[in-house]
Structures are given as C-alpha cells and as structure tokens.
Image (cartoon, grey):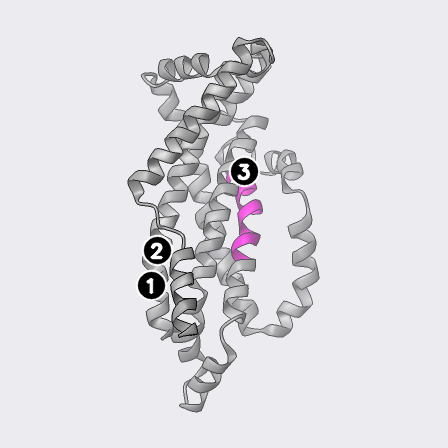
Amino acid sequence: MSDAIAGTIVMKNKPKRLTFGKLFLYRVLFLIGTFAIWQAFVDVGLVDEFWISKPTSVLAKLASLLPNQQLYTDILYTMKSTLIGFAISAVTGIATAVLFYKYSLLQKIVDPFILAMYSTPRLALAPLFIIWFGVGIASKVALVVSLSYFIFLLNAYSGLVNVNPRLLAQVRTMGASDWFIFRKVSLPASIPWILSGARIALGFSLVGAVVGELIIAEEGIGLRIAKASGLFDTTTVFAYLIVISIIGMGLDQAVRAAESRFASWSTNKAN
C-alpha cells in the first residue's frame, strides 16, 4: 500500500511536459517582455539611448538591412569560416581522442600540455593568426579551430573512456577483438558526449569567426559590427548582434536535431 501511495505522489509531482506550441509561446512572451523593459528604460530616461539604443530603432534598422544583398554576403562569409573551422575541429579533435584512447601512454604524456593549451586565451592569439595566415578567411578558420578543437577532443575522449567497464568485460569474455569493441561499444557510447561537445563547439566557432572579423577582415558580420562601433552606432551594432543570435539559434537547433537522431542510434548500437 505504501509503495502505491509513493508512486501516486511521484506521478503527481512529475512536471508536465510542455508542447512545442506552448514552449514557443512562452519564449515569444519572454522576448517581448525583455524588449518592453528595454524600451521602457530608454523612454523614461533611466538609460541614455546613445549607449544601448532601443528596440524600436534596432528593429527598424534590422528591417532596412534585410533587403540589402550585402547582409547575406556577410552572413555567408561568416558562416563559411565558422563551418570550415568547426568541421576541421570535429575531425581532428575526434581523431586525436581516438589516438589517445588507443595509446594511453601518449595521452598521459601530453595531457598537461593539452590542458595548458586549453587554458590559454586563444582570442589573444588572433593577431598572431592574422600575421601567420593573412587577413583572409584562413586566419578566421585558424581562430575557430583553436577554440573548438579542444572541446571535441576532451568530450570525445571522455565519452570513449567512460564506457561501462562491466559492459566491456562482458564483450571481452565473448572473445571480441579490440577493434570490434571500439566499433560496436565504445564509439556508439561516446556519440552523446561528442554531440554535446558539438553544441558547445558550434557556439565557440561562431564567436571565433566573428571575433576574427572584428579585428580585421574583408567581409563578414564582424567587420560590419567593427565599423558601426567605430562610428558609435549602437543601433546597427545591436541589429547585427540579433542576426548573429538568430544564426546561433539556428545552428544549435540543427545540432539538437542530430543529437536526438543519433542518440537513439548510439543506444541501439551500444546495446
């Protein structure tokens, strides 16, 4: 009887799952509320419009940018360096993790150096990347890789080494080879770790691309922000920041979709 009562209490306390429609509505209301507070602060004079602009001005500026072909050229330029750097980081980071998983002695030797490089403020290296790779897209890709590579490496390696040891022991007792265990157990089990790292790395990739463009670039959203900042045009700065935010949310949703798809695949493969 007590178990039944306890089960009833758990069911009552279980939070209700929001539908997509309700969740979207709550997010829209939150955004509107944030913009309303921002607008009110400026209108009543609590904050000077010169420093933070106001939503009505920002949205009007954004509307004027949308028909401009230059906006989409800049978006494509920024996306190009973001995705190229992200792809290079994914391949090299995961490959290094597999290498460390295979040769644990190598991992122990280089581990302190990896952590030292990971702790280094890579954004401070941006001027060096420009000197080494020029003002073109290569320097932005290098900055993106320097930010995202370690995220893939650490997450992929953690996923590989944190597989249930009992599961590995059971597979080995069946006579499975190390290659078979890697393909059928360790790698599928590490997929959620890799995808979790991918979400973080994608955000850092976008940041790296934009920061590189802020310093010096031929095109890109970062270049437009840098020019607007130099003119103290906060309205334009916020308009481009909204563009970056929309791009970031779109990329995150893409990774979420991949995460939900491959998570079930990895579970099935691991089982």
Direction from residue 80 to residue 141 in the image, left or right: right
Q: Inspect the image, locate mark 3, and give the three-letter code of the amino acid beneath it.
A: Gly
The disc placed on residue 208 is 3
Name the residue nearer the viewer: 265 or 92: 265
Image marks 1 and 3: residues in contact by CB distance under 8 Å: no
Locate residue 155, reporting x and y percent.
53, 59
Residue 3 in the magenta stretch? The answer is: no
Residue 203 appears in the rendering = yes
Residue 143 in the magenta stretch? The answer is: yes
Residue at image position (60%, 73%) is 104
Indicate the secondary structure of the residue bearing disc 2.
helix
Image quadrant assignment for residue 47 = top right
Disc 1 target residue: 264
Disc 2 target residue: 260
Image quadrant assignment for residue 135 = top right
Residue at image position (42%, 62%) is 10
Q: Nearer the viewer, mark 2 or mark 3?
A: 2
Direction from residue 152 to residue 71 in the image, left or right: left
Image marks 2 and 3: residues in contact by CB distance under 8 Å: no
Q: Quadrant of the N terminus?
A: bottom left
